Image (cartoon, rainbow, N blue to C red):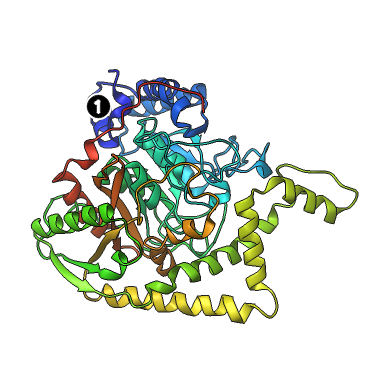
Amino acid sequence: MSDLFAKSLRELRGLLDAGECSSRDIVQALHDRIEAVDGTVGAYLEHDLQDALKQAAAADERRAAGETGPMLGIPVAIKDLLNVKGQSCRCGSKLLEGYVSPYDATCVAKLRAAGAVMFGRVNMDEFAMGASTENSALGLTRNPWDLDRVPGGSSGGSAAAVAADTAIVSLGSDTGGSVRQPASFCGCVGLKPGYGRVSRYGLTAFASSLDQVGVLSKTVADAADTLGCIGGYDPRDSTSVRQELPDVSGAFSGELKGMKVGVAEEFFGVGVDPEVEAAVRKAIDHVAGLGAEIVPVSFPHLQYAVAAYYIIAPAEASTNLARFDGVRYGARVDADDPVELMKRTREAGFGPEVKRRVLLGTYVLSSGYYDAYYVKALKARALIKRDFDEVFSACDVLLGPVSPTPAYRIGGEINDPLTMYKGDICTIPANLAGGSGMSVPCGFSSDGLPIGLQILAPAFSEDRLFRVGHAYEQSTEWHVRKPQLTVSRDT
């Protein structure tokens, strides 16, 4: 079966259960697809076919022995900041060149236990700092829908791989929209679970109070199945929450009667492109047509979200990235004394965006500025969290745009960081509040670029996302469209 690479996780599971293909067949089909198109897209940094085939053979043996499971034998692509034992974990940076992980991240360990195949590492903005994957020091990733456009970021490689059918499902991370925005740009599903739902152990930290491991997939059901595998309490992560995984048994009925769906006009008043607004409003009307009640809600403190985020996140990054000093692991630029060694290593190893954020974070945490900036940002965060609490007392989910625009051209905004930061306005609030969110395809621009509908819900209410997202997805055809990729070219 030559088109295994194009099928969803659930479709492949059905074929595996019926004995119509093997996990080895799926891995080989993905490898052949990568050989055909990834020279064009550039989603993968590395993948080891022989190791993946070995894992697949073990999964096939487990299935032959009578074992079943939603992830058994399914290949999963891994964002380059999640540790996989025996693989590099460079975080899109020159600074970690040569580092090989000695352990598995908890989410990776759970996938292994379930029989999934760890299949390759995909590109990202350096240390997850960026919204286009142009900040990667390891290569350029293109949007499969338009090779002159960015795939989004920082999980751009994860989204591009799913959209290009070089991955069945990918793991990413979402600090301020880094799963949902690339999913919107690339026309796939992007899930950000509630903060604390998925262990961050083994996830290279950017901003510890905001980071969350997420999922990029071809369908909502595939995202739900993957979350069911990787979610749950982990004593090795102090921010992990003892909370039962959501019961999704009733999430895929297509029935939305009785659900209250909030719409906040503030999300449409932040420079949203007219084509994006039209597609999202049409999607909201469609959800109403499925039986949901539309409820007007308000976010009076949304205007402070970007400013608060770009104080809090760099402050935490400044602290987290202090460990990359050239002494313990990764690249090193030798010098006569330790201080000079650290300075030279970080100067040579960090890219411009990482340096910008580390400097900003160090500044706002410094004496005399901590109260003026960092403390005020925390207060603004509390107000935004209160807005969410009030909204979700009136509705079950919130609908709006993911990004103000479709994917922009490569090189179009990389030299204008403030404009790029403003593009996070619709996704940042959920991270500040710790809630859950999802992007599902809801249309295309006149240029043929995907547009995503954002669904937001309280933390640990991912079942609400799945219910609304699946009902919308299965009653429309946006998710079945595929980009046309026929000829490889050197990037």
Q: Residues within 10 Å of mark 1 (few under 14, many from 20)?
A: some
Q: Where in the figure is residue 130, as x and y percent of width and height? A: 51, 52
153 and 66: which one is in front? 153
Please tell me in which quadrant of the rendered image residue 207 appears. Answer: bottom right
Q: Tell me what residue is drawn at x 28 percent, y 39 percent.
A: 448
Count of residue discs: 1
Classify residue 97 as left or right of residue 79: right
Decide if residue 242 is in sight here.
no
Q: Tell me what residue is drawn at x 37 percent, y 57 percent.
A: 193
426 and 16: which one is in front? 426
Which residue position is annotated with label 1? 15
Q: Where in the figure is residue 147, as x and y percent of width and height? A: 41, 33
Q: Where in the figure is residue 108, as x and y percent of width and height? A: 48, 43
Q: Tell me what residue is drawn at x 70 percent, y 43 percent.
A: 330
Q: Tell me what residue is drawn at x 36 percent, y 45 percent.
A: 185
**Residue at the extreme top:** 1
Decide if residue 249 is in sight here.
yes
446 and 37: which one is in front? 446
Classify residue 6 as left or right of residue 54: left
Assign a secondary structure to mark 1. Answer: helix
Classify residue 256 as left or right of residue 391: left
Please tell me in which quadrant of the rendered image residue 468 appears. Answer: bottom left
87 and 145: which one is in front? 145
**Residue at the extreme right:** 336
Classify residue 18 as left or right of residue 150: left
Three-letter residue code for mark 1: Leu
Q: Where in the figure is residue 481, as x and y percent of width and height? A: 24, 35
Q: Dividing the image into 4 quarters, which one contains the N terminus?
A: top left
